Amino acid sequence: MFEAKWKTEYREEQLRSFSDIDIDFQNRIADEVNKGFDTRDEMKEVFREIADEFDVSPDHVWRTYYSGEWK
């Protein structure tokens, strides 16, 4: 099926942008985990801040953390 060149380029740019955001998200989690947490409550608060920063649910941060994708 034919697709306009501008549409293909736009889609590719959006995928690159999404990939960059995902890498930044994972790096942010890694940075905070490497710093360490004094308590589980502190960890919850930091993960809530990350969720707010990237406009995702806290569950997404926890799933990424437990899946090990941030390593």
Image: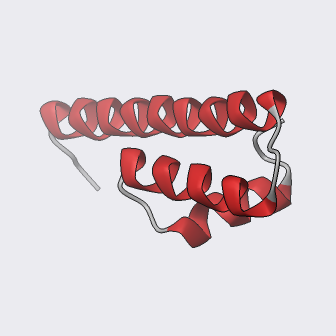
Q: Say how the picture is coloured.
A: secondary structure
Can you tell which quarter of the image residue 44 is in? bottom right
Q: How many marks?
A: 0
- Name the residue at 82% across, 46% down: 38
Q: Is residue 62 left or right of residue 25?
A: right
Could you tell me residue 18's position as x and y percent? 42, 40
Can you tell which quarter of the image residue 13 is in? top left
Report the quarter where the N terminus lies. bottom left
Q: 54 or 2, which is in the foreground?
A: 54
Q: Relative to 59, say whether 28 is above or below.
A: above
Could you tell me residue 33's position as x and y percent? 78, 38
- Name the residue at 51% across, 59% down: 48
Q: Is residue 59 left or right of residue 39?
A: left
Could you tell me residue 5's position as x and y percent? 18, 31
Q: Relative to 4, say whether 1 is above or below.
A: below
Report the quarter where the C terminus lies. top right
- Name the residue at 82% across, 29% down: 34
Q: 10 or 43, which is in the foreground?
A: 43
Q: 61 or 14, which is in the foreground?
A: 61
Q: Is residue 49 left or right of residue 65?
A: left
Q: Relative to 9, say whether 49 is above or below.
A: below
Could you tell me residue 4's position as x and y percent? 15, 40
Q: Relative to 49, say whether 34 is above or below.
A: above
- Name the residue at 85% across, 50% down: 68
